[in-house]
Image (spheres, rainbow, N blue to C red):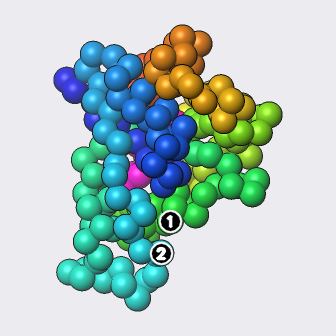
Amino acid sequence: MSVRILALVGSLRAGSHNRQLAEAAVKLAPEGAEVEVFDGLGDVPFYNEDIDVEGSVPEAAAQLRAAAQAADGFLFFSPEYNGTIPAVLKNAIDWLSRPYGAGAFGGKPVAVVGTAFGQYGGVWAQDDTRKAVGIAGGKVIEDIKLSIPGSLTRFAETHPADDAEVAAQLTEVVARLHGHAGETVAA
């Protein structure tokens, strides 16, 4: 049985280290796990109930919802912007939390990881992401964490997949999330 994990990246920058972490997660996924990085978060309009009308939901938001509905679990990659969650990631959570009571998270397991330049690796943003996605209906796996500090220097010349320590930690994150998602699928 294959388990589908949808990766959402909170940085739109082409050279984003969080995007590189997500790419590494795709490569390091264990057998039976498929990690898909969602492209297009930058195209999703800010959430507005006036445009969230059945039959006329903006295409980018509909694609996000469809990918989320097909997923068995979620892996968020969050940098830290001014001490908190990036707007693009919060916006994705808002779209996926609707319609109220029937959002795409639906109790599916969620893990939040990331990297940032600061000395704590973006923990405030990652904590805020856990809080928001938990309120939105995701089953946050609180003990799956990975915050990598000093991203600009650590990954200046090395892709996260080629950093042995990061690759080992990320492999563990994906394997553990895969286990939780597999239990949910089997239930």
As helix, strand or loop, the secondary structure at mark 2 comes to: loop
Relative side of 117 to 41, left or right? right
> Label 1 sits on what residue type?
Asn
Q: Nearer the viewer, residue 70 or 13?
A: 13
Relative side of 115 to 178, left or right? right
Q: Find the residue positioned furthest to the front.
A: 157
Earlier residue among tags 2 and 1 = 2
Do the residues under discs 2 and 1 have CB atoms within 8 angstroms? yes
Residue under pointer 1: 91
Residue 73 position (above or below residue 156): below
Q: Nearer the viewer, residue 142 or 42?
A: 42
Residue 78 visible in image: yes
Relative side of 142 to 15, left or right? right
Q: Find the residue positioned furthest to the right.
A: 119
Picture quarter with the C terminus: top left
Residue 114, image quadrant = top right
Taking the spot 74% from the left edge, 46% from the top edge, the residue there is 124
Give percent across and percent down for residue 14.
Answer: 45, 49
Residue 60, image quadrant = bottom left
Taking the spot 65% from the left edge, 26% from the top edge, the residue there is 154
Taking the spot 54% from the left edge, 11% from the top edge, the residue there is 164
> Label 2 sits on what residue type?
Phe
**Mark carried by residue 149:** none
Residue under pointer 2: 46
Over which residues does the magenta segment extend? 104-111
Picture quarter with the N terminus: top left
Residue 170 visible in image: no
Give percent across and percent down for residue 78.
Answer: 58, 45
